[in-house]
Image: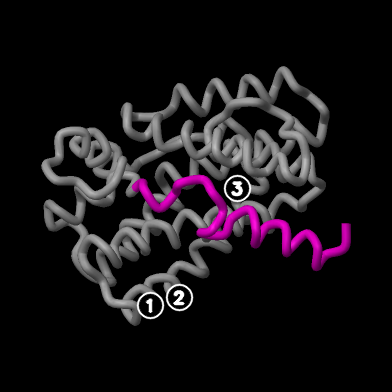
Amino acid sequence: MPTEARLLRLLTWLSPAFPTGAFGFSHGLETAIREGTVSDVRSLTGWIAGLMEHGSAWSDAVLAKAAWTAVTAEDHVALDDVAELAEALCPSLERRKETMSQGEAFLKAVAAWNPPPILSAPYPVALGAAAGAAGLPLEPALTAWLHAFGANLVSVAVRAVPLGQSDALQVLAALEPVIIRTAKRAAASTLDELGSASLVSDIASMRHETLDGRLFGS
């Protein structure tokens, strides 16, 4: 597949318009906003960067890489194991619903290009498996994945803080080196490097289950 076609495929699959329902989830960020932990450009940038370098987004990138590797090696047992591990690592019920519902929606939508190599999987595993099956290069796929993750949380903050569009663009610009760094590190990772230190985010996702008048599903 030509480079331009690979780029186009990633842009389509990880576009906000791709029907995964990502806009309906905040990954616990709504709780952090409601409690005042995240309220401006600085705190939002730090929150998302921490997830990418030390938290759930880092773990998801490692899992996406493992799924990509399993598919390119045609190791379906390993792919199933990665999917099971990814689901088991969800720290809360809402995080599980978030990743499983988006993964299911992604696999259903991506079948317009290729039959999915797995029928049900958490979102990062679904993305990694589909990218591997389509012959998309690993590091660009991880870069696009992390950018989509960050952009969705910025969109949450635009609606819930609320944050202005100019401030939102500042956050996206500040995240660029973090995304590139994390994608490069994840592309060389193994499952032994799974791990998260974002306990505040994990607890926020748990507290979200009882949040009054919430806008998002997680």
Residue placed under numbered mark 2 in the picture: 173
Q: Is residue 149 above or below residue 75?
A: below
Crowding at dot 1, Cα within 10 Å, few <14 / some 14-19 / many 20+, comes out as: few
Real-space Cα separation, disc 2 to disc 1, in angstroms: 5 Å
Quickly name the residue at label 1.
170
Give the camera-side residue of 110 and 121.
110
Give the quarter of the figure containing the C terminus: top left
SS label for mark 1: helix
Specify start and end residues of the magenta stretch as a single range: 1-25
Spot occupied by residue 199 in the image (x, y as percentages of width and height): 28, 39
Task: From the top left corner, tell me how far across and down residue 137 is, in percent.
Answer: 76, 52
Secondary-structure class at tag 3: helix
Label 3 to label 1, Cα distance in Å?
25 Å
Three-letter code, disc 3: Ala
The tag on residue 114 is none
Residue wearing tag 3: 186
Of circles 3 and 1, the one toward us is 1
Residue at the (66%, 48%) spot, across then down: 187
| Label 2 with label 1: CB-CB less than 8 Å | yes
The type of residue carrying mark 1 is Gln
Q: Type of residue at label 2?
A: Ala
Residue pictured at 63% horizontal, 53% vertical: 13
Whichever of labels 2 and 3 marks the residue nearer the N terminus, that label is 2
Q: Quadrant of the N terminus?
A: bottom right
Give percent across and percent down for residue 6: 78, 59
- Residue 173 location in percent, x, y? 45, 75
As displayed, is residue 194 above or below residue 33?
above
- Say which quarter of the image contains residue 97: top left
User: In percent of the image, x 62 and y 20: which residue is there?
Assistant: 81
